[in-house]
Structures are given as structure tokens and as C-alpha cells.
Amino acid sequence: MDGVAVQRCERCPELVDSRSRIVNGVGPEDAALCFVGEAPGAQEDAEGEPFVGRSGDVLDEVLRDVGLSRADVRITNCVRCRPPDNRDPKQGELANCRGYLERELSIVDPEILVTLGKVPAEHLLDRDVAITAEAGDLVETRIGDRPQRLLLSVHPAATLYDRSQREPFEETIERAAELAGEAVGDQSRLGDY
Ligand code: URA
């Protein structure tokens, strides 16, 4: 449990019913590279950690391929509670959880924030995103009162449904690692944590 963890929240009645627990972000509180997904799935809800199911296995593999491990990066979600039947989070749920994400990002202050999939990209950019076409794009935006460099990526699960997404996914994660590494003056390990 770190200083940005949410311990109690009952803002979304449907999610309070569907969750077993609140799934907070994990990883260093000063990580140069941060990943943000949509919401916890079944495995994440069971274990209390983001991206520990099949999507997480893909993310871990690709991080390894670029010389990083899960312990080097921050991993979080737009919504911290598992939606029923793994549906997408509703706009009101995203809005209810937004302050928690903004607080986490303001403390971590990552050099690069990678959005995993369409939902976090649209939520944080506040526009429609054609994620397959825009994946790999680096965008300057503002999140809360801070500027943020954001790199769009497909969701790791997309690589399981469509093998042709694997290579572009790997390229995006490699670029994210390079950009974050350049920013902290170490291209291979994102500096010393
Ligand atoms: N998908 C997400 O978007 N987040 C998780 O934590 C797991 C799967």
C-alpha cells in the first residue's frame, strides 16, 4: 500500500456490488514511465493488483523484451473497481475515479504516460480515438493542472485477439521506454529507482 492508494470509496453503487476490493496502482511513486489501463478484470479483482491476468502477462513479456520489469514502472487504471461482466466503465464511473488518478499522476509525475487501449486514451484526451490508427502517437496534453506527455497504445489484450497487433505494441512500449529513459538520462533502465 503506498501513499496514493484509495482505501475506501463507495461512489459507484454498481461497482461496489461487483468488486471484491479496490485495485490501486502499483510501482514506484517516482516512476518515469507509467501505464494506465481501463479497469480491473477478474484476476486483478481477485489479486488486488492491476494487469495480473492474461493482458498483464503480455505487458510483462514486452517490458522484459525492452529491458524493463514491472518493478521499474507504475501501472494503474482509470477506474479502480471491477465493472460487472467486464463491461467498459461508464462515463460517470470514469468521472468518479478521475480525482484519484489525477492525484496519483501528480505524485508520480511520470515523464511518459502510456494509455493501454481506447478507453483510457479517450478519457484522458477527452475526444474520440481510433486506437489502432493512433497507437504509437505521442501527444502533449494536460491532466488536471499538470502537462503530460502521453503515448497512445493498443491494449495488450488486443495482441491476443489479433497477432498482427503484437509487433506495433512492442514498438510502442520500446519507444515509451526510450523516451522515459532519455528524460531521466538512462536509456536502458529508466534511471535508478
Ligand atoms: N485490463 C485493464 O485495462 N486493466 C487491468 O488492470 C487489467 C486488464
Image: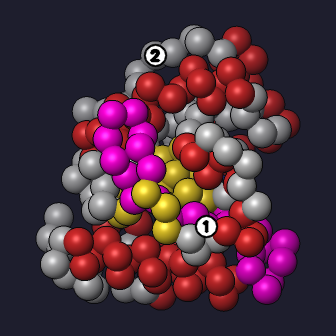
* Quadrant placement of the N terminus: top left
Q: Nearer the viewer, residue 16 or 177?
A: 177
Q: Position of residue 27 (x, y in %)?
A: 34, 54
User: Does ligand 1 reach within 8 Å of label 2's beta carbon?
Assistant: no
Does 177 appear above or below 79? below
Near mark 2 (Cα within 10 A), the count class, few <14, some 14-19 or many ≥20, is few
Can you identify the residue that label 2 sits on? 8
- The residue positioned 31% from the left and 55% from the top of the image is 110
Near mark 1 (Cα within 10 A), the count class, few <14, some 14-19 or many ≥20, is many
On the image, which quarter does residue 117 sit in?
bottom right
| Residue 122: assigned label | none
On the image, which quarter does residue 80 sit in?
top right
One can see residue 23 in this view: yes
* Quadrant placement of the C terminus: bottom left
Q: Nearer the viewer, residue 50 or 46?
A: 50
- The residue positioned 27% from the left and 49% from the top of the image is 109
In the image, what residue type sits under mark 1?
Ser
Q: Position of residue 133 (x, y in %)?
A: 74, 72
Q: Position of residue 129 (x, y in %)?
A: 71, 55
One can see residue 2 in this view: no
Q: Nearer the viewer, residue 193 or 102?
A: 102
**In terms of sequence position, does the residue under pointer 2 or pointer 1 come before the other?**
2
Does 170 appear above or below 100? below
In the image, what residue type sits under mark 2?
Arg
Verify CB contact (< 8 Å) between mark 2 and mark 1.
no
- The nearer-to-camera label among 2 and 1 is 1
Asked if residue 149 lies in the magenta stretch, the reply is: yes
Can you identify the residue that label 1 sits on? 153
Q: Position of residue 146 (x, y in %)?
A: 32, 41
